[in-house]
Image (cartoon, rainbow, N blue to C red):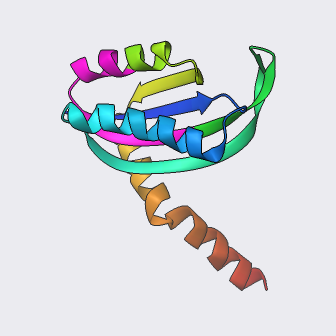
């Protein structure tokens, strides 16, 4: 099983409940088809780099998971069918990206920053 990372951008017109419901739907598509979710991160409402469908903001959500390759097509079909999804991007992670992701989750990058602030202070 390959490790993947998917970023989903949902329309900003959704309430928090509906946005969470949409994310839960995609999470269930993954788990029902044999994927193992490793990490999720809700980035919240962010400004888009350029307008999409006359919208300038969107709800961002990141899901990192291990899944068989054929599941990605099923997942992306679900994204395309759902009108709440503005954009999505799925990336297969290589060994360097997996190592970076593990460091980011463990907080290794924040620890270095805190140590330099303590030394400077």
Segment colored magenta: 61-75
Residue 89 placement, left or right of 76: right
Residue 45 in the figure: left or right of residue 115: right
**Compared to 43, does 55 lie above or below?**
above
Left or right side of 79 for 33 = left
Please tell me which residue lies in front, 5 or 44: 44
Q: Position of residue 50 (x, y in %)?
A: 79, 20
In which image quadrant can residue 51 be found?
Answer: top right
In magenta stretch: residue 111: no
* Position of residue 26 measured from the top left corner of the image (x, y, whole percent): 40, 33
| Residue 73 versus residue 68 in the image, above or below | above
Q: Residue at x 67, y 35 (%)?
A: 14
Query: Which image quarter is the C terminus in?
Result: bottom right
Q: Position of residue 85 (x, y in %)?
A: 57, 23
Asked where in the image residue 78 lies, by quadrant, the reply is top left
Q: How many marks?
A: 0
Q: Is residue 60 above or below residue 87?
A: below
* Residue appearing at x 51%, y 50% in the figure: 41
Q: In this view of the protein, can residue 118 be seen by the observer?
A: yes
- Say which of 102 and 78 sits in front: 78
Report whether residue 96 is seen: no
């Amino acid at each position: 099983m390959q490790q993947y990372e998917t970023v989903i951008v949902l329309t900003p017109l959704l309430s928090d409940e509906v946005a969470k419901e949409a994310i839960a739907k995609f999470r269930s598509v993954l788990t029902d088809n044999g994927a193992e979710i490793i990490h999720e991160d809700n980035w919240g409402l962010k400004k888009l780099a350029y307008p999409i469908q006359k919208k300038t903001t969107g709800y961002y959500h990141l899901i990192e998971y291990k899944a068989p390759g054929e599941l990605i097509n099923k997942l992306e079909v679900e994204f395309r069918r759902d009108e709440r999804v503005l954009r999505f991007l799925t990336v297969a992670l290589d060994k360097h990206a997996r190592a970076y992701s593990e460091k980011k989750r463990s907080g290794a990058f924040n620890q270095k920053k805190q140590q330099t602030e303590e030394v400077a202070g």
